[in-house]
Image (tube, rainbow, N blue to C red):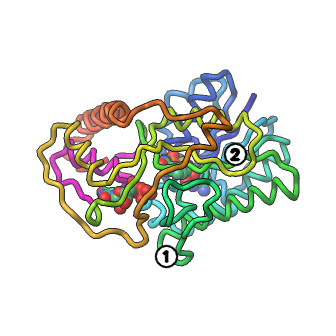
């Protein structure tokens, strides 16, 4: 089996490449390093079953000469500060990038999987969110560059399935964390960990009563693998339904690190969802999947990674404030 993974040098993409290789697959990783880095796949480069192609899937298209069994489309900025900094690029990769990836899958007669997001539900009126909920998205707000790009990508994927008979899957990923998140990607977990480990105040936005549900990366990858092997074409939520407020989340990280830093409150970004929790009934029933890694265990593993990163970077570049 050979899979082409767009965004394979990113946080989730690198774990997916690694997982597929460990299953005996060949992997072609395509990435332009917009928000990822080849350091994430450094340990795979000498593997004969792994190829890295540096390309922008939105503009260069996707050219690959060999056969492919799967195209897994993960390329897209994912952290709010990243997509707010790269608004046009985010819309381009959700639209042109998804179109190019779908076309390669069609040409190669490969199966296609879209990495979609819980952001399709926007700031939801119901919780937990089932796949049948259509969402509440501000189409012109700052977050729309990501939310609407992903909603368009889902619509395009379903159109290729219905009109062209392409064998497609859509995974709606809820907040996922783990090693290889960028320390400076601006998401809650890297921010809190970085702040706690380096003695800076932990910045909770708003009053911290908004909720998220954090899934450890190995659980997500297992869910994606099972979805790839299923026959389901409609979206499937993959996430951990253990919901926490962001203030509780900051406090958990503060306790785990043993840090004494203060928690400070900063303005809530516009359209920040008040609650987010996956209904995983469909994944349970269809894929016999549910998350296995409890929050404290996942956080311990992630902290270990960030400690190593900070140690390595501190000795490699003394005086550098932030990687
Ligand atoms: P990431 O930023 O670490 O990885 C995205 C990768 O895509 C990066 O390596 C980046 O360089 C690459 N990329 C971006 N634009 C590209 C382009 N035009 N051409 C080629 N490569 C490009 O983010 P992540 O957290 O690993 O997210 C991966 C996917 O999963 C994204 O599609 C994201 O929307 C989705 N997702 C992630 C989460 C999460 O919690 N991590 C939640 C929901 C959805
Ligand atoms: N957040 C926070 N402090 C930070 C970064 C984020 O309080 O330093 C909040 C953010 O406003 C949101 C939640 O934490 O309510 C999760 O943010 P993240 O960027 O991780 O992901 P999102 O779910 O918003 O895409």
Rendering quarter of residue 312: top left
Q: Secondary structure at mark 1?
A: loop
Report the side of 103 relative to 132 (left or right).
right
- Choose the circle earlier in sequence order: 2 or 1: 2
Image x and y of residue 42, in percent: 49, 32
| Left or right, 307 with reference to 146 | left
Q: Is residue 34 magenta?
A: no
Q: Which mark is residue 113?
A: 2
Q: Which residue is mark 1?
A: 141
- Mark 2: secondary structure: strand
* Relative image position of residue 323 (x, y in whole percent): 32, 47
- Image point (60%, 67%), residue name: 148
Q: Residue furthest bottom?
A: 140
Numbered mark located on residue 250 in the image: none
Classed neighbour count for the residue bearing mark 1: other residues with Cα under 10 Å, few (<14), some (14–19), many (≥20): few
Q: Nearer the viewer, residue 231 or 316?
A: 231
* Residue 200 included in the magenta stretch of the image: yes
Say which residue appears at 53% left-offset and 60% top-offset.
119
């Amino acid at each position: 089996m050979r899979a082409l993974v767009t965004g394979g040098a990113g946080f989730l993409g690198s774990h997916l490449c690694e997982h597929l290789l460990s299953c005996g697959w060949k992997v072609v990783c395509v990435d332009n390093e917009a928000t990822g880095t080849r350091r994430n796949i450094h340990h795979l480069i000498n593997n004969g079953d792994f190829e890295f192609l540096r390309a922008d899937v939105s503009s260069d298209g996707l050219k690959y000469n060999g056969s492919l069994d799967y195209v897994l489309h993960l390329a897209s900025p994912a952290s709010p500060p990243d997509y707010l900094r790269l608004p046009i690029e985010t819309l381009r990769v959700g639209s042109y990038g998804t179109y190019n990836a779908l076309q390669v899958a069609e040409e190669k007669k490969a199966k296609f999987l879209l990495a979609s997001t819980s952001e399709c539900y926007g700031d939801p009126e119901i919780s937990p969110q089932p796949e049948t909920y259509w969402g509440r998205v501000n189409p012109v707000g700052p977050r729309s560059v990501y939310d609407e790009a992903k909603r368009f990508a889902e619509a395009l994927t379903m159109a290729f399935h219905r009109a062209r008979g392409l064998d497609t899957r859509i995974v709606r990923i809820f907040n996922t964390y783990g090693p290889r998140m960028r320390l400076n990607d601006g998401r809650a977990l890297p921010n809190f960990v970085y702040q706690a480990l380096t003695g800076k105040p932990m910045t909770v936005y708003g009053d911290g009563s908004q909720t998220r549900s954090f899934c450890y990366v190995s659980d997500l990858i297992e869910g994606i693998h099972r979805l790839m092997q299923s026959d389901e074409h409609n979206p499937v939520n993959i996430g951990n339904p253990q919901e926490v407020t962001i203030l509780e989340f900051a406090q958990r990280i503060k306790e785990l690190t043993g840090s004494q830093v203060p928690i400070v409150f900063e303005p809530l970004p516009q359209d920040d969802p008040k609650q987010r929790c996956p209904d995983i009934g469909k994944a349970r029933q269809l894929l016999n999947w549910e998350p296995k890694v409890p929050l404290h265990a996942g956080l311990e593993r992630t902290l270990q990674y960030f400690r190593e990163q900070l140690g390595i970077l501190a000795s490699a570049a003394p005086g550098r404030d932030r990687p």
